Image (cartoon, helix red, strand yellow):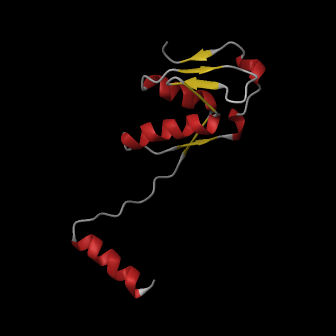
């Protein structure tokens, strides 16, 4: 560690700063993430066969954007972030016409 970095950290701690360990992500499926958002009152609708298949808060989103949204909610609740599991990549046929969340 550079002396300048050590000084900056020492000053930060002297002024009452705290260092927290980064929380490890929790593996979650796509459906678990959508269910979590619904439990937070966030309605997400799925439309198959389009570039941005999720509609939420009046805008279209991809899955990565939905995961970020869920993680923002989790961060505000001091919960570990989600990490999307490989098994959550399901075909759009299995969800045709399905909707998740409150209307």
Total count of labels:
0
88 or 5, which lies in front? 5
Q: Quadrant of residue 93?
A: top right
Residue 10 horizontal side relative to residue 46, left or right: left
Point out residue 69 in the picture as x, y percentages from the top left corner: 50, 36
Point out residue 65 in the picture as x, y percentages from the top left corner: 58, 37
Q: Quadrant of residue 63?
A: top right
Point out residue 73 in the picture as x, y percentages from the top left corner: 43, 37
Q: Taking 23 as reference, is 91 above or below it? A: above
Who's the residue at 35% across and 64% down the image? 19
Who's the residue at 67% across and 29% down the image? 52
Residue 69 horizontal side relative to residue 50, left or right: left
26 or 100, which lies in front? 100
Residue lying farthest to the bottom in this orientation:
3
Residue lying farthest to the left in this orientation:
15
Residue lying farthest to the front in this orientation:
59
Point out residue 83 in the picture as x, y percentages from the top left corner: 58, 44
Quarter of the image with the N terminus is bottom left
């Amino acid at each position: 560690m550079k002396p300048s970095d050590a000084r900056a950290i020492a000053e930060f701690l002297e002024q009452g700063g705290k260092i927290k360990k980064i929380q490890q992500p929790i593996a979650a499926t796509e459906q678990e993430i959508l269910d979590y958002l619904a439990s937070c009152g966030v309605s997400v609708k799925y439309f198959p066969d389009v570039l941005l298949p999720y509609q939420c808060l009046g805008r279209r989103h991809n899955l990565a954007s939905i995961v970020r949204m869920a993680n923002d909610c989790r961060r505000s609740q001091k919960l570990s972030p989600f990490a999307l599991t490989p098994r959550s990549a399901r075909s759009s046929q299995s969800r045709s016409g399905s909707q998740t969340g409150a209307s």
